[in-house]
Image (cartoon, grey):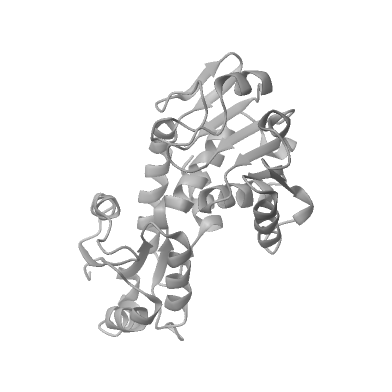
């Protein structure tokens, strides 16, 4: 059987060591790692990977798109898709900055303590790539989601973009320039903090007053995003609120990441973005 080759296209100057280690632990035989990749570079790299093998061998070649800039990763994914035709294609995983695997792991953690089919309400603090994907996955399950950003205009922009993929009536844009944090958190069942590293989004007192059923903080750099939660919390009951820190979610994120890499080599036509990664996560439990 041909060796499993993973072509890693990273938008950062230095390809991610983290992503490389996960790939090796997932059973990849050879890594071809390229940093500083732009959309203009993609065609030559992808064609070089595709045209060296016959169509019936292409499931043993796959692409991983990474880097710290998720928007840049999305551009690389779009450029890669344009390289495929007929049977000449390979499977692709987008996980720039861990956006898809982290979001999937966070939503799955919450679902262990709140049945999403019962339509709980959720607040997602942070309108960046991970926050957007959490909101997308939750709304896809029928959950009503507040997308909270520093500026309401930014939150509204995100909700309008997400409404192209899910029921927009489930999304509400809120801004801390219009509402205090206490009012944003009031009455919510699920709380996700996906803000910038080292920024406290919710104080311990605000968390206690809001008393959500589940609170998940994805910030591992101190100060943490939610006061009163520890980075290692994993389903820790803190005064009736089930709490997760970034490391507490990390074990599930790693399982999903490895499963996604393995999935790439089952066929030559998989495209794994947020929804596909989430479905993989549900399958592995």
Count of marks placed on residues: 0
Give 38 or 93, whichever is nearer the viewer. 38
Instruction: Kindly identify the residue that appears in the image at 36 percent across and 74 percent down.
Output: 38
Q: Indicate left or right for 153 with 276 as reference.
A: right
Q: Determine the image quadrant of residue 15.
A: bottom left
Locate residue 16, reporting x and y percent.
28, 56
Instruction: Kindly identify the residue that appears in the image at 66 percent across and 51 percent down.
Output: 155
Locate residue 281, reporting x and y percent.
49, 46
Please say if 34 is above or below 53.
above
Does residue 111 appear in this view?
no
Give 187 or 269, whichever is nearer the viewer. 187
Residue occupying the far top of the picture: 239
Give 90 or 147, whichever is nearer the viewer. 147
Pick the quarter of the image with the N terminus: bottom left
Instruction: Kindly identify the residue that appears in the image at 53 percent across and 35 percent down.
Output: 109
Q: Indicate left or right for 8 with 238 as reference.
A: left
Residue occupying the far right of the picture: 169
Locate residue 254, reporting x and y percent.
37, 43
Please say if 164 is above or below 124.
below
Does residue 154 appear in this view?
yes
Locate residue 178, reporting x and y percent.
73, 42
Give 232 or 109, whichever is nearer the viewer. 232
Instruction: Kindly identify the residue that appears in the image at 61 percent across and 49 percent down.
Output: 137
Please say if 90 is above or below 117.
below
């Amino acid at each position: 059987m041909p060796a499993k080759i993973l072509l890693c296209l990273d938008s950062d100057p230095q390809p991610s060591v983290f992503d490389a280690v996960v790939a090796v632990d997932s059973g990849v035989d050879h890594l071809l790692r390229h940093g500083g990749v732009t959309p203009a570079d993609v065609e030559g790299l992808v064609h070089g990977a595709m045209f060296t093998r016959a169509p019936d061998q292409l499931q043993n070649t796959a692409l991983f798109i990474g880097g710290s800039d998720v928007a840049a990763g999305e551009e690389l994914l779009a450029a890669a898709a344009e390289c495929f035709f007929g049977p000449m294609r390979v499977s692709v995983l987008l996980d720039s900055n861990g956006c898809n695997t982290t979001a999937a792991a966070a939503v799955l953690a919450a679902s262990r303590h709140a049945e999403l089919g019962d339509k709980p309400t959720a607040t997602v603090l942070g309108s960046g790539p991970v926050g957007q994907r959490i909101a997308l996955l939750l709304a896809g399950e029928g959950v009503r989601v507040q997308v909270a950003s520093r500026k309401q205009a930014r939150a509204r922009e995100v909700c309008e973009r997400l409404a192209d993929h899910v029921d927009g009536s489930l999304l509400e844009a809120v801004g801390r320039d219009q509402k205090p944090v206490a009012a944003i958190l009031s009455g919510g069942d699920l709380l996700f903090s996906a803000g910038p590293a080292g920024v406290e989004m919710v104080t311990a007192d605000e968390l206690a007053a809001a008393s959500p059923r589940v609170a998940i903080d994805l910030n591992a750099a101190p100060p943490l995003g939610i006061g009163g939660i520890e980075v290692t919390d994993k389903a820790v009951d803190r005064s009736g609120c089930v709490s997760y820190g970034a490391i507490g979610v990390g074990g599930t994120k790693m399982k999903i990441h490895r499963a996604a890499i393995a999935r790439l080599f089952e066929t030559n036509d998989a495209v794994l973005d947020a929804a596909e990664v989430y479905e993989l996560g549900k399958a592995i439990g």
